[in-house]
Image (tube, rainbow, N blue to C red):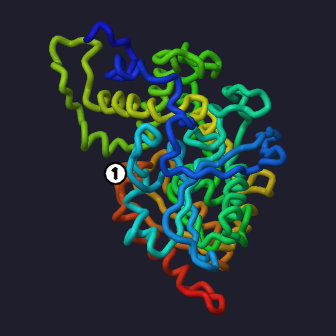
């Protein structure tokens, strides 16, 4: 083993450890395709948990053109480590990765930009242009860091509603998303039932389970235990002295439950590029190298405090909170709804989606469809299986679009 490599660090630590303390976006990197919306410039934005954000901003991107009657707008909600860049090329250093849903968005794709106006916004608490822990607090002139307040999916949905109105959209044709994004989709249908024409919920639940919270806990603890985390006040640390190990470890943990045992066995089994003999602690199986690679790749584009905030937001997800329980909350949904499950998803398993489907179907009042994604990619199947996920989603939204009433004189 290379003596310069510390145990538990990404395999390319010498390069990774020269990174800035945070991978959060900042204006000096350039805007790339981002646009910015001042969410509440004249008064504090009050959060569900009681916190306040002063002059918060949402970073967002759009594709396609909005119809004259604003009837073709689709809102895409991103997952935990996603951002507004759902479609397009990478633009280093402002955007290090290409669009995370490129297979789904674009001309001729399920979310056809020749037909629809697609919007995706980085959530409040994010680190890719929206106000989050890495942002400057206008009240203090310092970065929020660990003082950033708790944010919930309901706060995210309220901010997205305001963004829609800013764009001239009073009612979305559809709101779609997977994982954390799927949680926001449910909240949209419950909070603003008359403001959305359809919902597509992928690999999400109506409330966080004990096991999901347990997985989240160990990921967050990996960050807290990094000595360079220093209580979340690391932004002024020299390059290479940020909480990179903790963030990489959180990502390693997440990749274990984002994927499945079936996939790991198929891809890696017990293979190792390292010599097996003589036996030694440093010998790595291929699956370990994969986790190291995923951790090292993640660190340059994310922020440790943001991971804590958004990860906790997922734990707090509970559509029934303050609404008389899950069934009473789901009863507020009046929009046609498509729910998708991934066969091998053990983080958000199929019964959790069926719970939503059964609650909606019990009313026999709205259109409800359920789609199974046959993939061994686990929870990440909503990202990796465009041929299975895209067509039913696109057909569902197309059908809603075509069946909607057309105002006099409006082109369709």
Q: Residue 315, image x and y in percent?
A: 64, 41
| Left or right position of 283 against 384 | left
Q: Position of residue 189 (x, y in %)?
A: 67, 65
- Position of residue 253 in the picture relative to residue 59 (left or right): left
Question: Which residue sits at x=54%, y=28%?
Answer: 218
Looking at the image, residue 25 lies above or below residue 353: above
Nearest to the observer: residue 9 or residue 137: 137
| Label 1 sits on residue | 376
Q: From the viewer's perspective, is residue 320 above or below residue 226?
A: below
In what quadrant of the picture does the N terminus appear? top left
Considering depth in this image, is 360 or 186 the residue closer to the camera?
186
Task: Give me the residue at 41% from left, 36% from top.
Answer: 256
Position in image of residue 200 (x %, y %): 54, 65
Q: Quadrant of residue 269?
A: top left
Residue 49 drawn at (x, y percent): 79, 41
Relative to 321, is 354 on the left or the right?
A: left
Residue closer to the observer: 230 or 352: 230
Hey, which residue is sitting farthest top in the picture? 3
Residue at horizontal 65%, vertical 88%?
407
| Residue 391 found in image quarter | bottom left
Secondary structure category for the residue under label 1: loop
Can the viewer see residue 100? yes
């Amino acid at each position: 083993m290379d003596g310069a490599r510390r145990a538990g660090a990404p395999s390319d630590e010498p390069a990774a450890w020269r990174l800035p303390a945070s991978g959060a976006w900042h204006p000096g990197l350039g805007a790339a395709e981002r646009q910015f919306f001042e969410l509440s410039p004249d008064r504090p934005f009050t959060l569900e948990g009681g916190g306040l954000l002063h002059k918060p901003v949402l970073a967002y991107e759009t594709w396609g053109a909005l119809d004259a009657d604003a009837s073709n707008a689709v809102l895409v909600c991103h997952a935990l480590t996603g951002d507004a860049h759902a479609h397009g090329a990478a633009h280093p250093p402002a955007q290090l990765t290409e669009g995370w849903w490129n297979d789904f968005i674009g001309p001729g794709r399920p979310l056809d930009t020749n037909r629809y106006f697609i919007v995706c916004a980085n959530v409040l608490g994010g680190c890719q242009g929206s106000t989050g822990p890495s942002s400057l607090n206008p009240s203090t002139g310092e970065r929020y860091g660990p003082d950033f307040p708790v944010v919930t999916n309901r706060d995210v949905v309220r901010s997205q509603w305001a963004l829609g109105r800013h764009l001239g959209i009073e009612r979305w044709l559809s709101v779609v998303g997977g994982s954390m994004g799927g949680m926001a989709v449910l909240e949209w249908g419950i909070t603003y039932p008359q403001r959305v024409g359809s919902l597509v919920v992928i690999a999400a639940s109506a409330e966080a389970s004990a096991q999901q919270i347990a997985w989240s806990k160990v990921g967050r603890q990996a960050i807290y235990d990094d000595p360079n985390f220093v209580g979340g006040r690391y932004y002024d640390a020299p390059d290479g002295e940020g909480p990179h190990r903790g963030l990489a470890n959180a990502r390693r943990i997440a990749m274990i439950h984002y994927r499945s045992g079936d996939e790991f066995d198929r891809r890696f089994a017990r293979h190792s590029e390292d010599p097996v003999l003589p036996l030694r602690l440093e010998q790595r199986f291929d699956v370990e190298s994969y986790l190291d690679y995923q951790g090292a790749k993640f660190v340059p584009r994310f922020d440790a405090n943001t991971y804590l905030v958004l990860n906790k937001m997922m734990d707090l997800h509970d559509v029934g909170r303050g609404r008389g329980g899950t069934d009473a909350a789901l009863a507020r949904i009046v929009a046609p709804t498509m729910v998708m499950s991934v066969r091998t998803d053990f983080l958000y398993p199929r019964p959790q989606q069926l719970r939503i489907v059964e609650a909606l179907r019990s009313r026999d009042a709205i259109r409800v469809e359920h789609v199974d994604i046959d993939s061994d990619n686990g929870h990440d199947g909503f990202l990796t299986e465009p041929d299975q996920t895209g067509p039913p989603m696109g057909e569902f939204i197309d059908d809603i679009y075509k069946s909607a009433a057309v105002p006099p004189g409006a082109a369709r």
